[in-house]
Image (cartoon, rainbow, N blue to C red):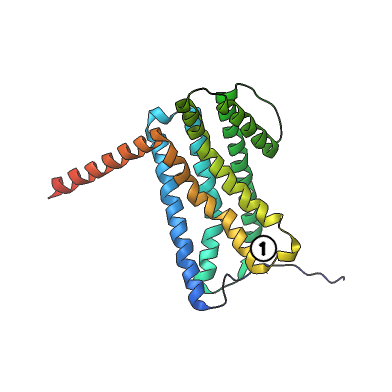
Amino acid sequence: MPNSSSFTQFLLLAVADWRELQLLHFWLFLGIFLAALLANGLILSAIACDHHLHTPMGFFLLNLSLTDLGCICTTVPKAMHNSLWDTTTISYNGCAAQAFLFFFFMSAEFSLLTIMCYDRYVAICTISLGLGCFVFILFSYVQIFRAVLRIPSQQGRHKAFSTCLPHMAVVSLFLSTVLSSYLKPPSISSPSLDLALSVLYSVVPPALNPFIYSLRNQELKDALRKMMTGCFSGAVKFWFSGV
């Protein structure tokens, strides 16, 4: 009978060797995780409750928040568990599920960013070309900048740039962290650097994307303000009615 072996678990790279640093990483991951849950949850609630945001761009923002939640919920809980309980293992099935879900959510997010870039490109340049995701994003923004610079009024150029800047920031954050992680020279590669870059592209973008979009979207800010004001006034009325 031939010899056979099977893998039941994998060893993960430890975030830190010192127990104090592991606990510090746990609290850091917990803060980022809660911030991402709160920010993306608020955006989901605002878009779902406000009919003024039931637009194509609102639809894409809602799905972008869902993919961000999927990305961060796939990776961060296990990292927090390992840092808190000082473990460095993951089961074979758990690793396969995590890899599949993370790849699925990242692919969905990149597709959404490409479609959102197409929306801005059509809105400003009124031309469309069927290219690949990465090339299409670059080509679209080249055409957008050319069209914006031809706008005669400064107010018109400012309005056009304000439409594109949040999307550019999200795409730049997403692509720069991924490309720096996988295309860095082998001479500067190290386990600690690989771990830091992996955290950057898997944890940081889902937490920052809601803030980037909400800062420049006045309709979204108004919807969030209205929703939070309504919740606060409802809580006050409930408190005083109970008293």
Visible residue check, residue 57: yes
- The answer to whether residue 116 is left or right of residue 181 is left
Query: In percent of the image, x 52 and y 70: which residue is there?
Result: 83
Q: Secondary structure at mark 1?
A: helix
Crowd around label 1: few <14 · some 14–19 · many ≥20 (10 Å)? some
Q: Would you place residue 78 above or below residue 71 in this image?
A: below
**Residue 27 pos. (x, y %):** 45, 66
Visible residue check, residue 12: no
Question: Amino acid under label 1?
Answer: Tyr
- In the foreground, 159 or 226: 159
**Residue 198 pos. (x, y %):** 61, 59
Q: Quadrant of residue 203?
A: bottom right
**Residue 184 pos. (x, y %):** 71, 58
Furthest-bottom residue in this view:
18
- In the foreground, 33 or 152: 152
- In the foreground, 114 or 162: 162
Query: In percent of the image, x 75 and y 67: which residue is there?
Result: 6
The residue indicated by pointer 1 is 92
Q: Would you place residue 9 above or below residue 168 in this image?
A: below
Query: In percent of the image, x 27 and y 39: which residue is there?
Result: 230
